[in-house]
Image (cartoon, grey):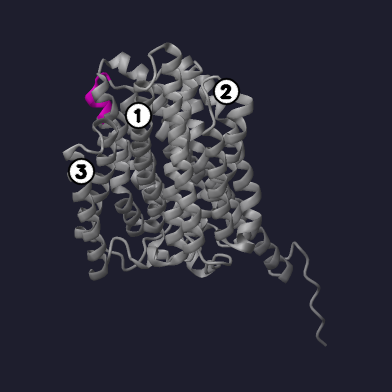
Amino acid sequence: MSHPAPPSTPGSPAGPETAAGRAAREQEHDHGRRWWTLATLGLAQLMVVLDATIVNIALPSAQADLGFDNADRQWVVTAYALAFGGLLLLGGRLADMFGRRRTLLIGLAGFALASALGGAATGFGTLVAARALQGVFGALLAPSALSLLTITFSDPKERGKAFGIFGAIAGAGAAIGLLLGGVLTEYLSWRWCLYVNVPIALVAGLGALRFVRPVPPAGNVHLDIPGVVTAVLGLGGLVYAFARAETDGWADPTTLVLIAVSVVLLVAFVLLQRRVAHPLLPLRVVLDRRRGGAYLAIALAAIGMFAVFLFLTYYFQQTKGYSPLRSGVAFLPFVAGIITSSTVIVPRLLPRIGPRFLITTGQLLGVAGLLYLWRLESDSGYAAHVLPALFVMGLGMGLIFASCFNTATSGTQPSDAGVASALVNTGQQVGGALGTALLNTIATTATTAYLASHAQSPSVVAEAAVAGETRAFLVSAGVFALGALVSLVVLPNGPNPVPQRGAQVPAGH
Protein backbone atom coordinates (compact mmCIF):
# COMPACT_ATOMS: atom_id res chain seq x y z
CA MET A 1 0.00 0.00 0.00
CA SER A 2 1.53 3.25 -1.04
CA HIS A 3 1.52 6.23 1.22
CA PRO A 4 0.90 9.78 0.03
CA ALA A 5 3.97 11.97 -0.09
CA PRO A 6 4.23 14.35 2.81
CA PRO A 7 3.45 17.97 2.03
CA SER A 8 6.41 20.09 1.08
CA THR A 9 7.83 22.43 3.65
CA PRO A 10 10.00 25.48 3.18
CA GLY A 11 12.94 23.42 4.33
CA SER A 12 12.40 20.61 1.86
CA PRO A 13 15.23 20.49 -0.66
CA ALA A 14 13.05 19.78 -3.69
CA GLY A 15 9.55 21.01 -2.81
CA PRO A 16 7.56 23.37 -5.06
CA GLU A 17 7.60 26.11 -2.39
CA THR A 18 11.36 25.96 -2.33
CA ALA A 19 11.59 26.43 -6.10
CA ALA A 20 9.06 29.24 -5.99
CA GLY A 21 10.83 30.82 -3.05
CA ARG A 22 14.16 30.58 -4.80
CA ALA A 23 12.69 32.22 -7.90
CA ALA A 24 11.17 34.98 -5.78
CA ARG A 25 14.47 35.59 -4.01
CA GLU A 26 16.33 35.71 -7.31
CA GLN A 27 13.77 38.12 -8.72
CA GLU A 28 14.05 40.33 -5.63
CA HIS A 29 17.85 40.20 -5.88
CA ASP A 30 17.74 41.17 -9.56
CA HIS A 31 15.30 43.97 -8.77
CA GLY A 32 17.62 45.43 -6.17
CA ARG A 33 20.62 44.93 -8.44
CA ARG A 34 18.94 46.96 -11.18
CA TRP A 35 18.60 50.00 -8.92
CA TRP A 36 22.22 49.73 -7.80
CA THR A 37 23.10 49.57 -11.49
CA LEU A 38 21.16 52.81 -11.99
CA ALA A 39 23.12 54.44 -9.14
CA THR A 40 26.39 53.37 -10.75
CA LEU A 41 25.44 54.58 -14.22
CA GLY A 42 24.05 57.81 -12.78
CA LEU A 43 27.41 58.52 -11.13
CA ALA A 44 29.20 57.93 -14.42
CA GLN A 45 26.80 60.28 -16.23
CA LEU A 46 27.14 62.91 -13.50
CA MET A 47 30.92 62.93 -13.89
CA VAL A 48 30.66 63.61 -17.62
CA VAL A 49 27.99 66.31 -17.27
CA LEU A 50 29.73 68.05 -14.36
CA ASP A 51 32.77 68.55 -16.53
CA ALA A 52 30.81 70.78 -18.91
CA THR A 53 30.60 73.59 -16.33
CA ILE A 54 32.83 72.85 -13.34
CA VAL A 55 36.01 73.66 -15.28
CA ASN A 56 34.55 76.99 -16.45
CA ILE A 57 34.43 78.13 -12.82
CA ALA A 58 38.05 77.06 -12.34
CA LEU A 59 39.38 78.75 -15.49
CA PRO A 60 40.30 82.20 -14.09
CA SER A 61 42.26 80.61 -11.22
CA ALA A 62 43.94 78.12 -13.55
CA GLN A 63 44.90 80.93 -15.92
CA ALA A 64 46.47 82.95 -13.10
CA ASP A 65 48.34 79.91 -11.78
CA LEU A 66 49.67 78.57 -15.10
CA GLY A 67 50.14 81.93 -16.81
CA PHE A 68 48.39 81.44 -20.16
CA ASP A 69 46.67 84.35 -21.91
CA ASN A 70 43.03 85.01 -22.78
CA ALA A 71 43.45 83.91 -26.39
CA ASP A 72 44.55 80.44 -25.24
CA ARG A 73 41.95 80.11 -22.48
CA GLN A 74 39.21 78.85 -24.79
CA TRP A 75 41.28 75.76 -25.64
CA VAL A 76 40.79 74.38 -22.14
CA VAL A 77 37.08 74.14 -22.98
CA THR A 78 37.37 73.53 -26.73
CA ALA A 79 39.82 70.59 -26.43
CA TYR A 80 37.28 68.64 -24.38
CA ALA A 81 34.32 69.60 -26.58
CA LEU A 82 36.17 68.66 -29.78
CA ALA A 83 37.16 65.19 -28.61
CA PHE A 84 33.87 64.46 -26.87
CA GLY A 85 31.56 65.74 -29.61
CA GLY A 86 33.61 64.31 -32.46
CA LEU A 87 34.07 60.81 -31.06
CA LEU A 88 30.66 60.08 -29.51
CA LEU A 89 29.31 58.05 -32.44
CA LEU A 90 32.51 56.03 -32.59
CA GLY A 91 32.35 55.49 -28.82
CA GLY A 92 28.78 54.24 -29.08
CA ARG A 93 29.66 51.79 -31.81
CA LEU A 94 32.70 50.50 -29.92
CA ALA A 95 30.39 49.84 -26.96
CA ASP A 96 28.17 47.75 -29.24
CA MET A 97 31.16 45.87 -30.63
CA PHE A 98 33.18 45.10 -27.51
CA GLY A 99 30.59 44.91 -24.73
CA ARG A 100 29.14 47.88 -22.87
CA ARG A 101 30.34 47.08 -19.35
CA ARG A 102 33.87 46.66 -20.67
CA THR A 103 33.82 50.04 -22.46
CA LEU A 104 32.18 51.65 -19.40
CA LEU A 105 35.06 50.48 -17.18
CA ILE A 106 37.69 51.59 -19.71
CA GLY A 107 35.98 54.96 -20.00
CA LEU A 108 35.85 55.43 -16.23
CA ALA A 109 39.51 54.49 -15.76
CA GLY A 110 40.67 56.70 -18.63
CA PHE A 111 38.56 59.67 -17.53
CA ALA A 112 39.95 59.41 -13.98
CA LEU A 113 43.57 59.25 -15.18
CA ALA A 114 43.06 62.17 -17.57
CA SER A 115 41.46 64.20 -14.76
CA ALA A 116 44.39 63.47 -12.45
CA LEU A 117 46.80 64.55 -15.19
CA GLY A 118 44.90 67.81 -15.67
CA GLY A 119 44.77 68.51 -11.95
CA ALA A 120 48.53 68.02 -11.65
CA ALA A 121 49.31 70.08 -14.78
CA THR A 122 52.24 72.48 -14.46
CA GLY A 123 51.78 74.04 -17.89
CA PHE A 124 49.14 75.02 -20.40
CA GLY A 125 49.99 72.23 -22.87
CA THR A 126 49.56 69.49 -20.28
CA LEU A 127 46.21 70.91 -19.17
CA VAL A 128 44.86 71.05 -22.74
CA ALA A 129 46.11 67.53 -23.51
CA ALA A 130 44.43 66.23 -20.35
CA ARG A 131 41.16 67.91 -21.31
CA ALA A 132 41.31 66.33 -24.77
CA LEU A 133 41.89 62.91 -23.17
CA GLN A 134 38.91 63.51 -20.89
CA GLY A 135 36.84 64.09 -24.03
CA VAL A 136 38.10 60.88 -25.65
CA PHE A 137 37.21 58.70 -22.67
CA GLY A 138 33.99 60.63 -22.05
CA ALA A 139 32.91 59.75 -25.60
CA LEU A 140 33.36 56.08 -24.71
CA LEU A 141 31.82 56.38 -21.25
CA ALA A 142 28.61 58.33 -21.92
CA PRO A 143 26.99 56.08 -24.55
CA SER A 144 28.08 52.97 -22.65
CA ALA A 145 26.26 54.18 -19.52
CA LEU A 146 23.04 55.09 -21.32
CA SER A 147 22.92 51.92 -23.41
CA LEU A 148 23.45 49.80 -20.27
CA LEU A 149 20.53 51.63 -18.67
CA THR A 150 18.45 50.92 -21.77
CA ILE A 151 19.01 47.16 -21.65
CA THR A 152 18.74 46.93 -17.84
CA PHE A 153 15.23 48.39 -17.48
CA SER A 154 12.53 46.86 -19.68
CA ASP A 155 9.42 47.16 -17.49
CA PRO A 156 7.64 50.40 -18.55
CA LYS A 157 7.05 51.64 -14.99
CA GLU A 158 10.57 50.88 -13.79
CA ARG A 159 12.00 52.26 -17.03
CA GLY A 160 10.12 55.53 -16.50
CA LYS A 161 11.51 55.91 -12.97
CA ALA A 162 15.04 54.96 -14.00
CA PHE A 163 15.14 57.33 -16.97
CA GLY A 164 13.54 60.06 -14.86
CA ILE A 165 16.42 59.86 -12.39
CA PHE A 166 19.00 59.59 -15.19
CA GLY A 167 17.45 62.54 -17.02
CA ALA A 168 17.51 64.61 -13.82
CA ILE A 169 21.23 63.91 -13.50
CA ALA A 170 21.87 64.80 -17.15
CA GLY A 171 19.89 68.04 -16.95
CA ALA A 172 20.88 69.21 -13.47
CA GLY A 173 24.52 68.12 -13.67
CA ALA A 174 25.62 71.33 -15.37
CA ALA A 175 24.04 73.47 -12.62
CA ILE A 176 25.53 71.20 -9.93
CA GLY A 177 28.89 71.68 -11.66
CA LEU A 178 28.61 75.43 -11.17
CA LEU A 179 27.91 74.95 -7.46
CA LEU A 180 30.60 72.33 -6.91
CA GLY A 181 33.11 74.32 -8.95
CA GLY A 182 32.45 77.36 -6.78
CA VAL A 183 32.94 75.39 -3.57
CA LEU A 184 36.14 73.68 -4.72
CA THR A 185 37.70 76.80 -6.24
CA GLU A 186 36.84 78.99 -3.25
CA TYR A 187 37.87 76.62 -0.47
CA LEU A 188 40.49 74.32 -2.01
CA SER A 189 42.01 74.96 -5.46
CA TRP A 190 41.04 75.00 -9.11
CA ARG A 191 42.92 71.70 -9.41
CA TRP A 192 40.22 69.96 -7.36
CA CYS A 193 37.70 70.75 -10.08
CA LEU A 194 39.60 68.05 -12.00
CA TYR A 195 40.72 65.84 -9.11
CA VAL A 196 37.11 65.43 -7.97
CA ASN A 197 36.51 63.10 -10.93
CA VAL A 198 38.94 60.53 -9.51
CA PRO A 199 36.88 59.45 -6.46
CA ILE A 200 33.66 59.63 -8.50
CA ALA A 201 35.15 57.35 -11.16
CA LEU A 202 36.53 55.00 -8.51
CA VAL A 203 33.14 54.56 -6.80
CA ALA A 204 31.38 54.18 -10.16
CA GLY A 205 33.97 51.62 -11.30
CA LEU A 206 33.56 49.52 -8.16
CA GLY A 207 29.79 49.73 -8.58
CA ALA A 208 30.07 48.61 -12.20
CA LEU A 209 32.18 45.59 -11.22
CA ARG A 210 29.76 44.67 -8.43
CA PHE A 211 26.33 45.42 -9.91
CA VAL A 212 26.48 45.87 -13.71
CA ARG A 213 26.18 42.53 -15.46
CA PRO A 214 28.64 41.79 -18.26
CA VAL A 215 27.00 42.29 -21.62
CA PRO A 216 28.34 40.29 -24.55
CA PRO A 217 29.23 42.23 -27.70
CA ALA A 218 26.40 42.66 -30.18
CA GLY A 219 26.52 40.18 -33.03
CA ASN A 220 27.17 41.12 -36.66
CA VAL A 221 28.50 44.61 -35.85
CA HIS A 222 31.58 45.82 -37.69
CA LEU A 223 33.47 49.11 -37.70
CA ASP A 224 32.63 51.32 -40.68
CA ILE A 225 35.97 53.08 -41.26
CA PRO A 226 34.76 55.60 -43.92
CA GLY A 227 31.81 56.38 -41.67
CA VAL A 228 34.12 56.88 -38.69
CA VAL A 229 36.37 59.28 -40.64
CA THR A 230 33.54 61.41 -42.05
CA ALA A 231 31.59 61.47 -38.75
CA VAL A 232 34.59 62.35 -36.57
CA LEU A 233 35.88 65.05 -38.93
CA GLY A 234 32.40 66.42 -39.62
CA LEU A 235 31.23 66.60 -36.00
CA GLY A 236 34.62 67.71 -34.69
CA GLY A 237 34.91 70.37 -37.40
CA LEU A 238 31.44 71.68 -36.59
CA VAL A 239 32.18 71.94 -32.86
CA TYR A 240 35.50 73.67 -33.60
CA ALA A 241 33.85 76.08 -36.03
CA PHE A 242 31.31 77.08 -33.39
CA ALA A 243 34.11 77.59 -30.86
CA ARG A 244 35.98 79.83 -33.34
CA ALA A 245 32.83 81.81 -34.01
CA GLU A 246 32.74 82.76 -30.31
CA THR A 247 36.10 84.50 -30.53
CA ASP A 248 36.57 85.38 -34.22
CA GLY A 249 32.98 86.02 -35.31
CA TRP A 250 30.68 84.31 -37.78
CA ALA A 251 32.05 86.30 -40.71
CA ASP A 252 35.59 85.00 -40.20
CA PRO A 253 36.63 83.19 -43.44
CA THR A 254 38.19 80.26 -41.58
CA THR A 255 35.02 79.77 -39.54
CA LEU A 256 32.85 79.82 -42.67
CA VAL A 257 35.11 77.35 -44.49
CA LEU A 258 35.11 75.03 -41.47
CA ILE A 259 31.31 75.07 -41.29
CA ALA A 260 30.98 74.41 -45.02
CA VAL A 261 33.50 71.55 -45.02
CA SER A 262 31.92 70.02 -41.90
CA VAL A 263 28.46 70.10 -43.47
CA VAL A 264 29.81 68.45 -46.64
CA LEU A 265 31.48 65.74 -44.55
CA LEU A 266 28.28 65.07 -42.60
CA VAL A 267 26.26 64.86 -45.83
CA ALA A 268 28.85 62.41 -47.16
CA PHE A 269 28.52 60.47 -43.91
CA VAL A 270 24.75 60.13 -44.36
CA LEU A 271 25.16 59.01 -47.99
CA LEU A 272 27.74 56.44 -46.92
CA GLN A 273 25.44 55.08 -44.22
CA ARG A 274 22.83 54.33 -46.87
CA ARG A 275 25.26 52.22 -48.91
CA VAL A 276 27.58 50.32 -46.58
CA ALA A 277 26.72 46.86 -45.26
CA HIS A 278 27.63 47.65 -41.64
CA PRO A 279 27.01 51.38 -41.07
CA LEU A 280 28.40 53.27 -38.08
CA LEU A 281 24.94 54.82 -37.67
CA PRO A 282 22.15 52.66 -39.12
CA LEU A 283 19.67 55.17 -40.51
CA ARG A 284 16.80 53.18 -39.02
CA VAL A 285 17.89 54.62 -35.67
CA VAL A 286 17.18 58.24 -36.65
CA LEU A 287 14.42 57.77 -39.22
CA ASP A 288 12.03 56.48 -36.57
CA ARG A 289 9.77 59.45 -35.74
CA ARG A 290 9.97 59.00 -32.00
CA ARG A 291 13.74 58.74 -31.81
CA GLY A 292 14.36 61.38 -34.48
CA GLY A 293 12.02 63.80 -32.73
CA ALA A 294 13.73 63.16 -29.40
CA TYR A 295 17.18 63.86 -30.88
CA LEU A 296 15.97 67.16 -32.38
CA ALA A 297 14.21 68.16 -29.18
CA ILE A 298 17.23 67.60 -26.94
CA ALA A 299 19.57 69.42 -29.35
CA LEU A 300 17.29 72.48 -29.42
CA ALA A 301 16.85 72.35 -25.64
CA ALA A 302 20.64 72.28 -25.19
CA ILE A 303 20.94 75.54 -27.15
CA GLY A 304 18.54 77.34 -24.84
CA MET A 305 19.64 75.71 -21.60
CA PHE A 306 23.30 76.57 -22.02
CA ALA A 307 22.25 80.19 -22.56
CA VAL A 308 20.69 80.20 -19.11
CA PHE A 309 23.88 78.90 -17.48
CA LEU A 310 26.24 81.10 -19.47
CA PHE A 311 24.46 84.43 -19.32
CA LEU A 312 23.01 84.11 -15.83
CA THR A 313 26.53 83.34 -14.59
CA TYR A 314 27.69 86.59 -16.22
CA TYR A 315 24.73 88.41 -14.70
CA PHE A 316 25.32 87.04 -11.20
CA GLN A 317 29.07 87.64 -11.10
CA GLN A 318 29.61 90.74 -13.25
CA THR A 319 26.40 92.69 -12.66
CA LYS A 320 25.33 91.56 -9.19
CA GLY A 321 28.83 90.92 -7.82
CA TYR A 322 28.17 87.34 -6.63
CA SER A 323 31.07 85.08 -5.73
CA PRO A 324 31.46 81.82 -7.71
CA LEU A 325 30.00 79.91 -4.75
CA ARG A 326 26.99 82.20 -4.38
CA SER A 327 26.42 82.00 -8.14
CA GLY A 328 26.32 78.22 -7.93
CA VAL A 329 23.85 78.32 -5.03
CA ALA A 330 21.65 80.68 -7.04
CA PHE A 331 21.07 77.91 -9.61
CA LEU A 332 19.58 75.49 -7.04
CA PRO A 333 15.94 76.32 -7.98
CA PHE A 334 16.77 75.06 -11.48
CA VAL A 335 17.99 71.78 -9.99
CA ALA A 336 14.86 71.53 -7.82
CA GLY A 337 12.64 72.02 -10.88
CA ILE A 338 14.42 69.32 -12.87
CA ILE A 339 14.28 66.79 -10.04
CA THR A 340 10.58 67.49 -9.48
CA SER A 341 9.44 67.00 -13.07
CA SER A 342 11.82 64.22 -14.11
CA THR A 343 11.33 61.99 -11.08
CA VAL A 344 7.69 62.75 -10.15
CA ILE A 345 5.84 63.73 -13.33
CA VAL A 346 7.60 61.89 -16.16
CA PRO A 347 7.59 58.37 -14.61
CA ARG A 348 3.82 58.63 -14.05
CA LEU A 349 2.79 60.15 -17.37
CA LEU A 350 5.29 58.95 -19.99
CA PRO A 351 4.19 55.27 -19.97
CA ARG A 352 0.55 56.38 -20.29
CA ILE A 353 0.56 59.27 -22.77
CA GLY A 354 3.96 59.10 -24.47
CA PRO A 355 6.58 61.80 -25.05
CA ARG A 356 4.80 64.22 -27.40
CA PHE A 357 2.80 66.15 -24.80
CA LEU A 358 5.56 66.06 -22.18
CA ILE A 359 8.39 67.26 -24.43
CA THR A 360 6.21 69.97 -26.00
CA THR A 361 5.11 71.17 -22.55
CA GLY A 362 8.75 71.22 -21.43
CA GLN A 363 9.70 73.38 -24.41
CA LEU A 364 6.84 75.80 -23.66
CA LEU A 365 7.92 76.03 -20.01
CA GLY A 366 11.37 76.92 -21.35
CA VAL A 367 9.78 79.71 -23.38
CA ALA A 368 7.95 81.00 -20.30
CA GLY A 369 11.06 80.96 -18.10
CA LEU A 370 13.22 82.73 -20.67
CA LEU A 371 10.61 85.39 -21.38
CA TYR A 372 10.56 86.08 -17.64
CA LEU A 373 14.35 86.42 -17.64
CA TRP A 374 14.10 88.69 -20.68
CA ARG A 375 12.64 91.32 -18.33
CA LEU A 376 15.75 91.39 -16.12
CA GLU A 377 17.39 94.71 -15.31
CA SER A 378 20.65 95.49 -13.57
CA ASP A 379 18.86 96.22 -10.26
CA SER A 380 16.38 93.31 -10.41
CA GLY A 381 16.04 91.26 -7.24
CA TYR A 382 16.90 87.55 -7.24
CA ALA A 383 13.82 86.28 -5.38
CA ALA A 384 11.31 88.15 -7.54
CA HIS A 385 12.91 88.07 -10.98
CA VAL A 386 15.33 85.12 -11.19
CA LEU A 387 14.22 82.36 -8.82
CA PRO A 388 10.74 81.79 -10.37
CA ALA A 389 12.18 81.72 -13.89
CA LEU A 390 14.86 79.19 -12.91
CA PHE A 391 12.33 76.87 -11.27
CA VAL A 392 10.00 77.01 -14.29
CA MET A 393 12.95 76.39 -16.61
CA GLY A 394 14.00 73.44 -14.45
CA LEU A 395 10.51 71.94 -14.64
CA GLY A 396 10.66 72.19 -18.41
CA MET A 397 14.15 70.72 -18.70
CA GLY A 398 13.17 67.78 -16.51
CA LEU A 399 10.23 66.99 -18.79
CA ILE A 400 12.45 67.25 -21.89
CA PHE A 401 15.54 65.40 -20.71
CA ALA A 402 13.85 62.48 -18.95
CA SER A 403 11.40 61.99 -21.84
CA CYS A 404 14.07 62.36 -24.54
CA PHE A 405 16.55 59.94 -22.93
CA ASN A 406 13.79 57.36 -22.60
CA THR A 407 12.33 57.89 -26.07
CA ALA A 408 15.64 58.17 -27.95
CA THR A 409 16.66 54.69 -26.82
CA SER A 410 13.22 53.08 -26.90
CA GLY A 411 12.56 50.31 -29.39
CA THR A 412 16.15 50.08 -30.64
CA GLN A 413 17.63 46.76 -31.65
CA PRO A 414 20.12 45.47 -29.05
CA SER A 415 22.94 45.90 -31.58
CA ASP A 416 22.07 49.60 -31.95
CA ALA A 417 21.75 50.54 -28.25
CA GLY A 418 25.24 52.07 -28.03
CA VAL A 419 25.05 54.24 -31.12
CA ALA A 420 21.45 55.30 -30.32
CA SER A 421 22.64 56.39 -26.88
CA ALA A 422 25.59 58.24 -28.41
CA LEU A 423 23.24 60.31 -30.56
CA VAL A 424 21.51 61.71 -27.48
CA ASN A 425 24.83 62.98 -26.12
CA THR A 426 25.82 64.22 -29.58
CA GLY A 427 22.64 66.30 -29.74
CA GLN A 428 23.44 67.81 -26.35
CA GLN A 429 27.06 68.52 -27.23
CA VAL A 430 26.54 70.01 -30.69
CA GLY A 431 23.47 71.94 -29.54
CA GLY A 432 25.37 73.35 -26.57
CA ALA A 433 28.34 74.35 -28.74
CA LEU A 434 26.09 76.03 -31.31
CA GLY A 435 24.03 77.78 -28.63
CA THR A 436 27.08 79.10 -26.79
CA ALA A 437 28.66 80.49 -29.98
CA LEU A 438 25.48 81.88 -31.56
CA LEU A 439 24.05 83.46 -28.41
CA ASN A 440 27.43 84.88 -27.38
CA THR A 441 27.60 86.68 -30.72
CA ILE A 442 24.03 87.98 -30.34
CA ALA A 443 24.69 89.18 -26.78
CA THR A 444 27.95 90.90 -27.74
CA THR A 445 26.30 92.67 -30.66
CA ALA A 446 23.46 93.93 -28.46
CA THR A 447 25.89 95.11 -25.77
CA THR A 448 28.03 96.97 -28.32
CA ALA A 449 24.97 98.65 -29.85
CA TYR A 450 23.77 99.78 -26.41
CA LEU A 451 27.16 101.27 -25.53
CA ALA A 452 27.33 103.08 -28.88
CA SER A 453 23.99 104.78 -28.27
CA HIS A 454 24.57 105.89 -24.66
CA ALA A 455 27.07 108.11 -22.89
CA GLN A 456 29.75 106.09 -21.11
CA SER A 457 29.38 105.59 -17.35
CA PRO A 458 29.62 102.64 -14.94
CA SER A 459 25.84 102.31 -14.80
CA VAL A 460 25.60 102.37 -18.60
CA VAL A 461 28.23 99.63 -18.86
CA ALA A 462 26.20 97.50 -16.45
CA GLU A 463 22.98 98.14 -18.35
CA ALA A 464 24.72 97.34 -21.65
CA ALA A 465 25.81 93.94 -20.32
CA VAL A 466 22.27 93.18 -19.18
CA ALA A 467 20.92 94.31 -22.57
CA GLY A 468 23.13 91.70 -24.27
CA GLU A 469 22.16 88.97 -21.82
CA THR A 470 18.43 89.61 -22.10
CA ARG A 471 18.67 89.65 -25.90
CA ALA A 472 20.21 86.17 -25.66
CA PHE A 473 17.34 85.06 -23.41
CA LEU A 474 14.81 86.31 -25.95
CA VAL A 475 16.46 84.44 -28.82
CA SER A 476 16.68 81.32 -26.64
CA ALA A 477 12.93 81.60 -26.01
CA GLY A 478 12.48 81.52 -29.77
CA VAL A 479 14.63 78.38 -29.98
CA PHE A 480 12.42 76.67 -27.39
CA ALA A 481 9.32 77.77 -29.31
CA LEU A 482 10.81 76.16 -32.42
CA GLY A 483 11.48 73.03 -30.34
CA ALA A 484 7.83 72.92 -29.25
CA LEU A 485 6.70 73.17 -32.88
CA VAL A 486 9.13 70.45 -34.00
CA SER A 487 8.00 68.17 -31.19
CA LEU A 488 4.33 68.63 -32.12
CA VAL A 489 4.97 67.93 -35.79
CA VAL A 490 7.52 65.09 -35.58
CA LEU A 491 6.63 63.12 -32.45
CA PRO A 492 3.63 60.77 -32.81
CA ASN A 493 0.88 60.41 -30.24
CA GLY A 494 0.79 57.50 -27.81
CA PRO A 495 3.22 55.81 -25.45
CA ASN A 496 6.62 54.47 -26.46
CA PRO A 497 6.84 50.82 -27.52
CA VAL A 498 7.48 48.38 -24.70
CA PRO A 499 10.99 46.85 -24.96
CA GLN A 500 11.13 43.15 -25.69
CA ARG A 501 12.31 41.51 -22.51
CA GLY A 502 14.21 38.80 -24.25
CA ALA A 503 16.20 41.26 -26.28
CA GLN A 504 16.83 43.67 -23.48
CA VAL A 505 18.00 41.59 -20.55
CA PRO A 506 21.79 41.61 -20.27
CA ALA A 507 23.38 38.23 -20.43
CA GLY A 508 26.59 37.30 -18.73
CA HIS A 509 29.46 35.53 -20.31
Q: Is residue 125 magenta?
A: yes
Distance between mark 3 and mark 1 Cα atoms: 19 Å
Question: In the image, residue 90 lies at what x, y percent?
Answer: 29, 53
Tell me: residue 369, above or below residue 342: above
Amino acid type of the residue that numbered disc 2 sits on in the rendered structure: Ser
Amino acid type of the residue that numbered disc 1 sits on in the rendered structure: Thr
Report which quarter residue 136 is drawn in. Answer: top left
- In the structure shown, which secondary structural element does the residue marked by tag 2 occupy? loop
Q: Does residue 275 appear to the left or right of 153 in the view shown?
A: left
Amino acid type of the residue that numbered disc 3 sits on in the rendered structure: Leu
Which residue sits at x=20%, y=58%? Answer: 225
Tell me: residue 209, above or below residue 99: above
Which residue sits at x=50%, y=22%? Answer: 316
Quadrant in which the N terminus is drawn: bottom right
- In the structure shown, which secondary structural element does the residue marked by tag 3 occupy? helix
Which residue is denoted by mark 3 in the rendering? 256
Which mark, by number, is residue 380?
2
Residue range (magenta) = 122-128
Question: In the image, residue 27 lies at what x, y percent?
Answer: 63, 60
Distance between mark 2 and mark 3 Cα atoms: 39 Å
Neighbours of disc 2 within 10 Å: few (<14), some (14-19), many (20+): few
Distance between mark 1 and mark 2 Cα atoms: 21 Å
Foreground mark, 2 or 3, reads 2
